Amino acid sequence: MELRGFMHEMILTELEDAVGVENVSHSSDQKLAYGTDYFWLARMTVDKGGNPALPDYVVRPGCAEEVSKVLKIANYYKLPVQTWGGGSGSQGGALPMAGGIVLDIKRMDKLLDIDTKAGTITCETGMIFQTLEWYANEQGFSVMHLPSCLTCCTVGGALAHNGIGILSTKYGKIDDQCLSVEVALPNGDIINTLPVPKHSSGPNLLPLFLGSEGTLGIMTKAKFKMTKLPEVRRHHAFLFKDISTGYDACREIVQTVKPSIVRLFDEAETVSIIKKVIGFEKRGSFMNLTVEGHAKIVAAEEELILDICKKYDAEYLGTEYGEKWFENRITFFYPGYIMNNPQMFGTLDTVATYDNIEKIYWAMKKAVEETYDGVRFISHSSHWYDWGCMNYSRFIIDNPPEDQEECIRLHNRIWNAGVRAAIANGGVINDHHGVGLKLGRLMKESYGPAMQVLQGIKKELDPNGIMNPYKMGL
Amino acid sequence: MFSKDSARQADACRFCWMCRHICPVAGATGSEAWTPRARGLMISMIERGTEFDKDIAEAMYHCTLCDACANDCVTGYKPSEYTREARMRAVVEDLAPAAVIKMIDTISECGNIFGLSAMGKLFEKAGKLPEKAEVLLFIGQTAEAMRADTGVHAISILKKAGIDFTVLADEPASGAYLGELMGYTGDVQAVAAHTAKMIADTGAKTLVVLNPADAAMFKEQYGAWGLLSGIEIVTATAFIAALIADGKLKVKKAGIAGSLQEPVKLTRALDEIAPFKAIADACGIELTELFLNGKMSRCIGTVPFDVYAPEVAAQMVRVRCEDAVRLGSNLIITASPDDFYIMSKYATDGVKIADIYEILDGLC
Ligand SMILES: Cc1cc2nc3c(=O)[nH]c(=O)nc-3n(C[C@H](O)[C@H](O)[C@H](O)COP(=O)(O)OP(=O)(O)OC[C@H]3O[C@@H](n4cnc5c(N)ncnc54)[C@H](O)[C@@H]3O)c2cc1C
Ligand code: SF4
Ligand code: SF4
């Protein structure tokens, strides 16, 4: 939207009135900081010296009431509002593609309550997730949400696209850990979901907002359950002859016991990233696994796991590599260890039932490899349920085209091919990184006529379409 | 153009989010532009044609150069290096904030960032000291101007231990604050060379440094410039901890509980964690341990930072006080005149800021 005359200043002063002069900015440093999140296309743009999409206003509210005021102003002027947590999302979800307001939530980082008897912890959603975990740890508890972005994502960002942590196989996804949220709706009303996440008191509102990526409202507070820190946490590693055997063995393990971590790597990832970070040298399908909780139960679980792996002819690698993986679990994400520009890359994570997951692995690999000659495809499965698991597959192109437009075309073609292979074989667009700007165009294909349900809700809650335009296909 | 090394480091950090949780400025303000990765991004964009303007320069000054980010990182990259270089450029290109320029001028004119000296008051309280001695105690600008008591107690402790020492009556600046404000330029090197000469002229064999910021400057940067060679540089905490260990100071137990504000220049720049704890232990202080201690200790600002961003320093102190109170402590004990000076200004109600030198002096 073009603002004429001194309209820009009129809106600026109104925003300043809502959140304080020092918390509204349009200076070049503040705006540039929001020009790129973890999305490869945004990174490529600045890497090539291009112009990123910048906001007109950076607004940093300090409480839910201020968020509400900003939303009312934005609605009146029909200004886009892009909520920004840590900006560590990989789908371009927080990018201010439509200009307008970037609403940075990180000033809202208060710990509101910690109840060791009930085992709950409540905070504002701008808190960095690591901080929340530290608060729980101080009392001998954990939220048990330990994603690799623990140190960089906010609580709100993790909730906004329904994230997942490394301990998920035992403790679940964030929607298993979150009990309730407070939300500022697009019209500025502040609502709460019901106090508990399981009930028969009408359709559950909580899952509607978890994964809504800032398109339906802004989550301002959240309550989580906590779990006592485990008495023991023990790591193991195995080598399977191939990923197919690995899938069968891991399925049987998680249908028998409850490990916290199960990570099965295809051979391509075993001989590349696993070798580089933890120094494991053999070919095959590497798997590391962690069991934790009460010592007696853990011992019994370990015995069953060893039996199952034996049945599938796995080589037991002892505890060393599992421990090394755990120690280095975030090393994988630092510059020099993870792919970086100018390489083109993306994480095509999806989730499916056990009858489909291996089909998806092969179909996606074929689709990606057929789209471009110089592409590498690596994959692992790291979040397991008793009904299915996810695939965390990556494509990597070491020498992508120089031309920016060519890059965008190739990038989107690969994504289309990979995600369509997943959808065609019983998978979904994404497991835990969300949809964002990157994959919005595929939502209708995935949902089919069910998309009208989401569109109806969007229209009702956000009739002016101010909340995170171009994202999630809404 | 930034140096090759800064450009390379900024290029790595610009797309990396891993250390933002540990950055005290980003944490206290929630500002995205004041994260290590945002500064890396801005520098990498400047290298690709974006104009380096006053706003970007302002962001370069919203960093305490505490190196929490680098300490937490597995790669060896150090955002403080490119940030310091950006400041050098900002000063040269006349983009630095007015408050920064004013501080540089004040240090250049008066030798002290506060523009005043209370050395007279310090000597009045400390009594007469010899002109030359084996040991030279370097007081630093904050103790000189704003926190004479830390200096007085440190002097008293050394006297009680029977140390043959002195203090420079017209003590010059180490250049630590100047280096923070404008990078390690030729001007800063000239200041350092002058100071090194004054120290050498005393004939001291050991330089005991009260302010951790000065100690880091002497140990790291003077060494790189070939200054002070042949003189042993020891932090006051390490020197006093050794006196206690050697039985030269007999210390009674205080019977108090508190949490230590471990100076980041000690814990990270100098990798010196044990001495402050050893002194606290000798004083019988029961420690309330935080998550962010030792190598991860939380920075509450520096003296120059407090001058150009007082509201941010105040917020960092509030965050630090909250940590202490949440874990059941309302006493925070400092080992740096800078920390004492800044924390005393902004401590939240009910939280007391104490000085380890004052506590120890009262017990021995
Ligand atoms: C190194 C690295 C490792 C990662 N590892 C994992 C992992 O292990 N597991 C995992 O699940 N993800 C992982 N991710 C991706 C993950 O999606 C993001 O890191 C994180 O969840 C995003 O949080 P953020 O606070 O940075 O959100 P942002 O990137 O700022 O925003 C993401 C989306 O959420 C919306 N949003 C943010 N806050 C709110 C709010 N309060 N209310 C409503 N909407 C909001 C934004 O508008 C945007 O659409 C990783 C990312 C990185 C960079
Ligand atoms: S210092 Fe390390 S962790 Fe921080 S941004 Fe740079 S590379 Fe990432
Ligand atoms: S040096 Fe300290 S203040 Fe500066 S970016 Fe790193 S952690 Fe933040």
Image (cartoon, rainbow, N blue to C red):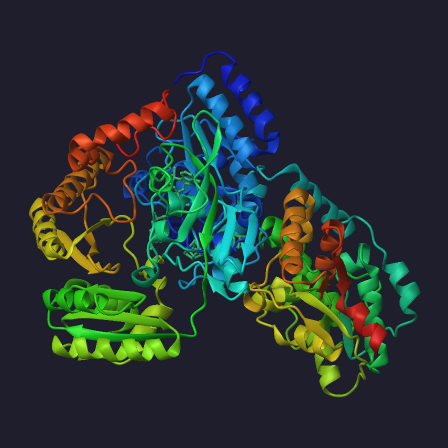
Quadrant of picture, ligand 2:
bottom left
Expressed as whole percent of the image width and height from the top left, the position of residue A210 reads: 36, 42
Residue A461 at x, y percent in the picture: 37, 26
Position above or below: A316 against A77: below
Q: Nearer the viewer, residue B54 or A156?
A: A156
Q: Which residue is rendered at x = 38% and y = 28% of the image?
A: A467
Identify the residue shown where x is 84% and y is 83%.
Answer: B162
**Observer able to see residue A368:** yes
Apparent side of residue B102 relative to residue A256 in the rendered image (left or right): right
The reply, left or right, for residue B58 in relation to residue B122 is left
Query: What residue sits 25% from the left and 49% below the top?
Result: A431
The residue lying toward the viewer, choosing from A183 and A270, is A183
Instruction: Tell me the quarter of the image containing the C terminus of chain B.
Output: bottom right
Q: Quadrant of residue A146?
A: bottom left
Q: Nearer the viewer, residue A2 or A105?
A: A105
Give x and y (percent) for residue A188: 48, 27
Report the number of discs.
0
Q: List the single residue furthest toward the bottom.
A: B247
